[in-house]
Amino acid sequence: MRRYGKHTDEDDIRSRPNRKGNRPRTHIRPKHEDAAEGMVLTVDRGRLTCLVGDRVILAMKARELGRKAAVVGDRVALVGDLSGRKDTLARIVRIEERSSVLRRTADDDDPYERVVVANADQLAIVTALADPEPRPRLIDRCLVAAYDGGLTPLLVMTKSDLAPPDKLLELYGDLDIPYVVTSREELQSGDAADRVRELLDGRITAFVGHSGVGKTTLVNALVPEERRRTTGHVNAVTGRGRHTTTSALALPLAGTDSWVVDTPGVRSFGLAHIDPSRVINAFPDLVPGTEGCPRACSHDEPDCALDAWVTEGHADPARLYSLRRLLSTREPREGD
């Protein structure tokens, strides 16, 4: 038997035959340059419904993507059977870079963040003016997530026939957030949908709100051909509704290039993943005043330079108050 020394040639080394007859593994991955572009419409137990051109395709994530998950709104590259016929399955081989991400955690102590929707332009925060009562702290949390993720917020107030919107409008007036007020009558007649539709023009808008506020009812009015199950039941003890939408779903607005994304009702909106220092970017009129702040300033402490900046008349004090209210929203309080 020949022994191998330090100076062996490649021809001297024997290799075992591949009994399975398959190709050896390689770290070189295909680029899939001919893959088709698509958009993820919904995700259900590992199966992703995507829109490729004018065809709806069922797909699964390729193993080579590892733990990287695609979510509603993602732009993806697909290969395989793209016919859209029954019992066919394509493969997602690439997830394109996201322009925006709406994320949340279960609570503020949960390190695991959940991506709700990708590439949305706008976040419509739906809140009822009564039945159930408005939850400003939850609205504040949604605003922080929108600012952090690169989405423009829109406030949608429903059930104005049960209570006036004045208090909420006063609370958020200094943030210059676009808003629309609707009633149950207007939803039934279609007038509310027409006014909301004007604010969605040319955008992908994610709708979020806690259960029972009429979010899915509004989405049904906007996209009547894709009606989703709604609820009129609000618990008399807790003031909370029952979940009816169980998964996010992107729906096109007929005759436009606009999309709405209906998301499951939330009972909490954790912000464990949010860096408070990024919230200031949603207040461009206050950003110059932070140049004199100490390092790692939270903008809600005694040495913050924003106090002097506002006192000198460079910005409206109400804007600084709004910023600090949003920054403090991570502090848990009863009724949040």
Image (spheres, helix red, strand yellow):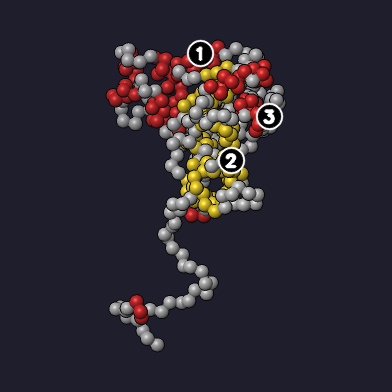
Mark 3 packing: few (<14 Cα in 10 Å), some, or many (20+)?
Answer: some
Q: Amino acid at mark 3?
A: Thr
- Residue under pointer 1: 170
- Residue under pointer 2: 42
Percent coordinates x, y for residue 128 in the rendering: 61, 20
Q: Is 13 placed above or below 319 here?
A: below
Circle 1 sits in a helix, a strand or a loop, which is it? helix
Judged left or right of residue 77, residue 302 is left
The residue at 34%/76% (across/down) is 10
Circle 2 sits in a helix, a strand or a loop, which is it? strand
Viewer-nearest of discs 2 and 1: 2
Circle 3 sits in a helix, a strand or a loop, which is it? loop
Which is more toward the observer, 151 or 222? 222
Tell me if residue 71 can be seen: no
Quarter location, residue 217: top right
The residue at 43%/42% (across/down) is 97
Question: N-terminal of the two: label 3 or label 2?
Answer: 2
The residue at 64%/20% (across/down) is 190
Calculate the distance from the C-alpha at mark 1 to the C-alpha at mark 3.
Answer: 30 Å
